[in-house]
Image: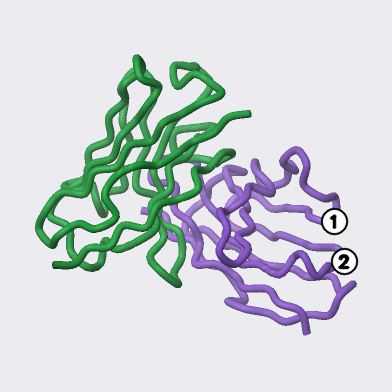
Amino acid sequence: DIQMTQSPSSLSASVGDRVTITCRASQGISNYLAWYQQKPGKVPKLLIYAASTLQSGVPSRFSGSGSGTDFTLTISSLQPEDVATYYCQKYNSAPGTFGPGTKVDIK
Amino acid sequence: QLQLQESGPGLVKPSETLSLTCTVSGGSISSSSYYWGWIRQPPGKGLEWIGSIYYSGSTYYNPSLKSRVTISVDTSKNQFSLKLSSVTAADTAVYYCARLLRAAGPVDYWGQGTLVTVSS
């Protein structure tokens, strides 16, 4: 099975900072990559799919890029409401493996 | 607005079978555009994809759980179900039912989740 890794595992940044999270697949998955945001005690929320397509209603400060094995999620200007754990997920074929998550908080 | 709601016992004994049902409202489970699946999250840990099903009955399972998992669909009730056999404490988790855009993802709608504890 394809393994998914994320870095860093956690980060602390100031409001307004640009934040970048990396997700890597152990084999190529084309652009079959999604990003989710999970706030504490809440249900995960789809942010981005097809590596770079913003889900309806998601703020434009979120963006995604990459293809093949290396992907990034960028928050252009971190807001207090962005405190959450972010997960990537590959979905080119079953199983739809998730990355281990990156916890983001405010410095 | 599509809604998914998990139901089932919150406590299961070790070695027994965990059974959950997801009821879909606000949309048809027979839509050809979507798959329906289960994802779990142990307390304080990350997300694990369990498996998914198409309305026709085609199933896709995580190899790590495949020997113990069965997902089924009842289109007449607009429901789908999860059975996980021979459970241990490691199966304690919040179980989410979900709508998927493809067999493996992404997930665009989630249920609220239900905590299932495996304990005697």
Asked whether A3 or B110 is in front, the reply is B110
Amino acid of disc 1: Arg
Horizontally, residue A12 falls left or right of residue B117, namely right
Q: Colour of chain A?
A: purple
Q: Is residue A20 left or right of residue B8?
A: right
Query: Image height check: is A93 above or below A23?
Result: above
Q: Secondary structure at mark 1?
A: loop
Asked if marks 2 and 1 fall on the same chain, the answer is yes
**Viewer-proximal residue, B39 or A81?**
A81
Q: CA distance from mark 2 to mark 1?
A: 6 Å
Pointer 2 local density, CA inside 10 Å: few below 14, some 14–19, many at least 20: some
Dot label at residue A77: 2
Q: Which amino acid, by three-letter code, is at mark 2?
A: Ser
Name the chain letter of the residue that bears numbered label 2: A
Q: Secondary structure at mark 2?
A: loop
Quarter containing the C terminus of chain A: bottom right
Spot occupied by residue A4 in the image (x, y as percentages of width and height): 49, 61
Which residue, given by chain and number where applicable, does mark 1 sit on? A61
- Residue A64 x/y as whole percent: 73, 53
Q: Residue at image x 46%, y 65%? A: B46
Chain identifier matching the green colour in the rendered picture: B
Task: Give yes or no for contact between labels 2 and 1 (Cβ–Cβ under 8 Å).
Answer: yes
On screen, residue B1 versus residue A28, left or right, reads: right
Residue appearing at x 44%, y 47% in the figure: A96
Query: Please, which chain is the residue tagged with disc 1 on?
Result: A
